[in-house]
Image: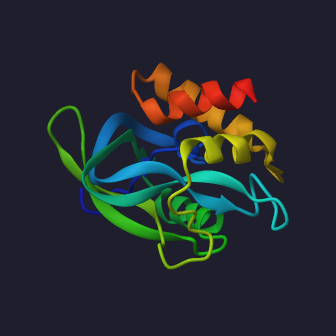
Amino acid sequence: MEDELWVFGYGSLIWDPGFEAAETHVARLDGYQRSFCMWSVHYRGTADAPGLVLALDLSPGANCQGLALRAKPGTEAATLAALRARELISYAYREARLPVALPDGRKVNAVTYVINPGHDQYAKDLSLNEQAQIIARASGVRGPNREYLLSTYHHLTKLGLDDPDMAWLVQRMTAL
């Protein structure tokens, strides 16, 4: 249906979507990669000690596996308003409607949030070791940055989704 609202979650929206989903599927988004490429100065860090959160970074030839969630009918406007209030707090993300592939072969246009590479919160080209060190120490109003990493990794693993960089980050951050 044209008035359906699909949302693609690749980080915290997987384990804390903030809305009731009528349908949930593992899904794939082509042309982007999940990356700890956004400085968090609100939720998982502060302006003085920023953390890192996930964003979709444009990467031709790559793909990102996550969850496609269809909002419960009748809640589309409220769901979109809540997502915008949460995700567009500093406009480091850009809201986009992108095609995601579902396991049954359908493609749906889903709202998702991609990094704005021109924003000062874009954390470009940090090594995995640098990311682990930042995540290990940062904390913000939603808690320690390490909890964000661990929860996302746990939920991806539970869904059977492999993310080697995130697995490495978990091991390194735990060692720190």
Instruction: Please name the residue shown 54% across and 29% down the image.
Output: 168
The foreground one among 36 and 12 is 36
Screen quadrant of the C terminus: top right
Residue found at the very far bottom of the displayed protein: 118
Instruction: Please name the residue shown 43% across and 30% down the image.
Output: 164
Picture quadrant where residue 119 is located: bottom right
Q: Is residue 79 left or right of residue 43?
A: left
Q: Is residue 135 left or right of residue 38?
A: right
Does residue 69 lie above or below 59 as drawn?
above
Picture quadrant where residue 175 is located: top right
User: Can residue 135 be seen at all in this image of the molecule?
Assistant: yes
- Residue 15: give x, y in percent of width and height: 58, 36
User: Can residue 111 be seen at all in this image of the molecule?
Assistant: no
- Residue 66: give x, y in percent of width and height: 40, 39
Picture quadrant where residue 171 is located: top right
- Residue 154: give x, y in percent of width and height: 57, 25
